Amino acid sequence: MERPKPTRVEKKMKDGDFIVSKTDTKGIITYGNEIFIQMSEYTEEELLGAPHSIIRHPDMPRVVFKLLWDTITQGNEIFAYVKNLAKSGSYYWVFTNVTASYDKSGKIIGYYSVRRKPNEAVIPTIEGLYKQMIEKEKEGGMEASGKFLMDFLDSQGVTYDEIINTLQRS
């Protein structure tokens, strides 16, 4: 499937909406709720069996997804701001929480993601940070982008989780 060309058209989630999706351990979509289908503009048939990266916007630093995967594969939850790409090329921001799903023996069998409307007041801050991270990625790969993020967090005296959750509550 050809990736859509990003446009400047923004879609916004409603205050009470929750986008829900589930993936297997490789990130292949196994479930998406109606709001996920509507916001992504893909059909359920197009989404099921597709990699979750089908909605990855090119404005997202790759290191954010590395951090996400490093965190969830260890069984820990993560919160993040993510800019998603719809099939039409439009985009939408979400505040996401991703957690592992387990079988009865405690083995991770997939991941569960719940997204809600982000705190719109902080999106310009996140966009600025992500833009700088992408520039670092272009210069020195994900390692440079990750170092930039860690240096930024250190300069603020916070962890990634602390800053993300503080921004959402502010």
Image: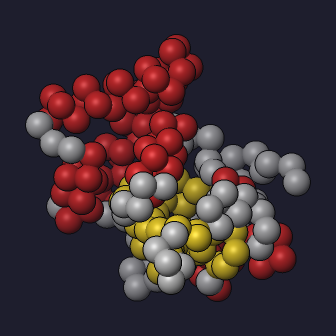
Q: Look at the image and tell me in which quarter the N terminus lies.
A: bottom right
Does residue 73 lie above or below 109 as drawn? above
At a point 79% along the width and 48% down the height, the residue shown is 3
**Is residue 135 something one can see in this rendering?**
no
For this view, does 1 lie left or right of residue 153? right
Query: In this view, which residue lies farthest toward the front?
Result: 105
Q: Position of residue 55 (x, y in %)?
A: 66, 57
At a point 24% along the width and 59% down the height, the residue shown is 165
Q: Position of residue 77 (x, y in %)?
A: 37, 63
Q: Position of residue 87 (x, y in %)?
A: 75, 61
Q: Look at the image and tell me in which quarter the C terminus lies.
A: bottom left
Query: In this view, which residue lies farthest toward the right?
Result: 1
At a point 76% along the width and 45% down the height, the residue shown is 5
Query: In this view, which residue lies farthest toward the top?
Result: 139
- The one of 76 and 132 positioned closer to us in this rendering: 76
Residue 91: which quarter of the image? bottom right
Q: Position of residue 161 (x, y in %)?
A: 26, 53
- The one of 40 and 72 positioned closer to us in this rendering: 72
